[in-house]
Image: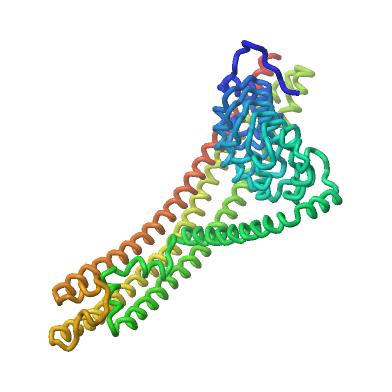
Amino acid sequence: MAHVFGFGEKIAVINDELLHKAVTEQAPEAQKAYGQDVDASEKDIVMLRLDLSKILKIDNLWAFTNLRKLQLDNNLIETIENLDSLVHLEWLDLSYNQIERIEGLDKLTKLKDLSLHSNKIQRLEGLDQLKHLEVLSVGQNNLASLDDAPVLYLRRFRKLSCLNLAENPLCDDPRYESYCIAMLPQLVFLDYRRVAAETRQSARIKYQDQLEVVEKADADQILAEEREEEAAAQRARLAKACVPGLSGSAFFSRMVDKDFASLREVEGMDELFETLEARLVTAIDTLVEFAVSESERRNDEEAEFREALQDGIEAINDRDARRLEEFIERKAEIISALAASGSAVDMERAEVLRDDLGALKHQLMDAEIDLVGQIEDMLGNFERAYVEMCSKVTEQAQSTFTEVRQLIEEIETQVGDVANGHIDAIIKGEMELNALQLSPQAQEVLRDKLALGSAMTTAHDNHIGEVDSTEDAILAAVTEARTKLLEGIQTNMDKRHRARVAEIMRFHKYHLTDIERVLNDI
């Protein structure tokens, strides 16, 4: 049942007060346990209800980055917006609002269940990135017809098993049920009714001809997506290996100067250019393969380091957790006994407990300092190994491009000799330039030795410039990736350390306050 807001009622906004109230009321009990007397933070909330709140605009949810479920139904929302930070959201209810267009959902790639029931939507659109969508409710909207609301658009959601379009004008079309079932073969439920096997078979027969065309288009689309995924994966591998987008053939095409390339038209040049291309492509592709192989080795080294690091931290945490549990159990027993008896013996035990709490804090702090030292040693060893592995790529790159420079100079010299030979023959009248059937660009280069010399000098500078630029980019990428990784690990370890110290201090403060309160009350 939609919530009806009375005329003149005050419109609400999602402000700090509203969010604090919701978080306080909905914080999981686990957040309040184990002696934590602080409010739950936004990052601790995985489910949030803001329904029936007269909200007009979605806003101020950026900090709830771990939300899995968000309930915004029965409000006055007109636009889907400001949800980009909720990247872990799986369930979103925007039913019973005033939304006219499906938009603003591109970043919610993990969304599985989306309800837009009872709004003012006129088209099925804006869902392209929701590859994991399983449940979609767009019932009671303004979807006018099967043609205007493209049911075929929903075929791309291969996990969509439950679709609700009930109470839209298009449902009056006699083709509605059979068309939807035929065109969306993955559906298990349509308008909350299970699709019977005989109904599905009958629908497929009815739209057999159209389905053949649609399924062929789907197959082509799937093939194109698979190829793009492979290409994207390869781009990612090359970027991770610090040779982004690099390939021998692309490097050759990018490197060769246009005036220099025009000389390939001259008789006797083709073999020289083929040699240059073949050897350049081989050298660069060999470097790329080496860089990718070394990248995989570095990934394995990093994974082993992180696993060992996590094992060490968890071992310390488990030991400390047992200490904390033992203290909490002992505290509960002593305070319970003191509350029951009020005896001097139990009072003394409580005072000893207070002293032991201070000792426990120091033990935990000492353990944390020892752990930080161990982590620094592990990180130092990892850094040395990782830097050495990175140096192999830089050394291979420098060696490869030294070889490339030598090859370029060798081929340039040979091309220059052949070109000079043609110019000499033209000067002696042994051949005519026009008779060589060269492009205007090549003819200009062979006009005389001065033009040839100028073109060759420019070409050499361009060739070496591209080689230097590519080499510098690889070396810089290796350095940047190494620095980013090591600094990132160090930053995370520093954050972990600060959080751990703060946790120990909170534990001590809470239980010390509790013990002193009991002592003062006796």
Question: Between 331 and 223, which is closer to the camera in this rendering?
Answer: 223
Indicate left or right for 301 with 333 as reference.
left
Q: Specify the quadrant of the image occupied by residue 42.
A: top right
Residue 86 in the image, given as x and y percentages of width and height: 59, 37
Q: Is residue 247 visible?
A: yes
Residue 406 in the image, given as x and y percentages of width and height: 29, 76
Q: Specify the quadrant of the image occupied by residue 454.
A: bottom left
- The residue depicted at 21 percent of the width and 82 percent of the height is 417
Reply above or below: 262 against 33. Answer: below
Q: Specify the quadrant of the image occupied by residue 59.
A: top right
Image quadrant containing the N terminus = top right
Reply above or below: 453 against 211. Answer: below
Question: Between 320 and 396, which is closer to the camera in this rendering?
Answer: 396
For the image, the number of numbered tags is 0
Reply above or below: 276 against 393. Answer: below
- The residue depicted at 63 percent of the width and 19 percent of the height is 54
Q: Is residue 93 visible?
A: no
- Protein image colouring: rainbow
Reply above or below: 479 against 411. Answer: above
Image quadrant containing the C terminus = top right
Residue 259 in the image, given as x and y percentages of width and height: 26, 70
Residue 488 in the image, given as x and y percentages of width and height: 47, 48
Question: Between 333 and 477, which is closer to the camera in this rendering?
Answer: 477
For the view shown, which residue lies furthest in the top direction? 8
Question: Between 77 and 27, which is closer to the camera in this rendering?
Answer: 77
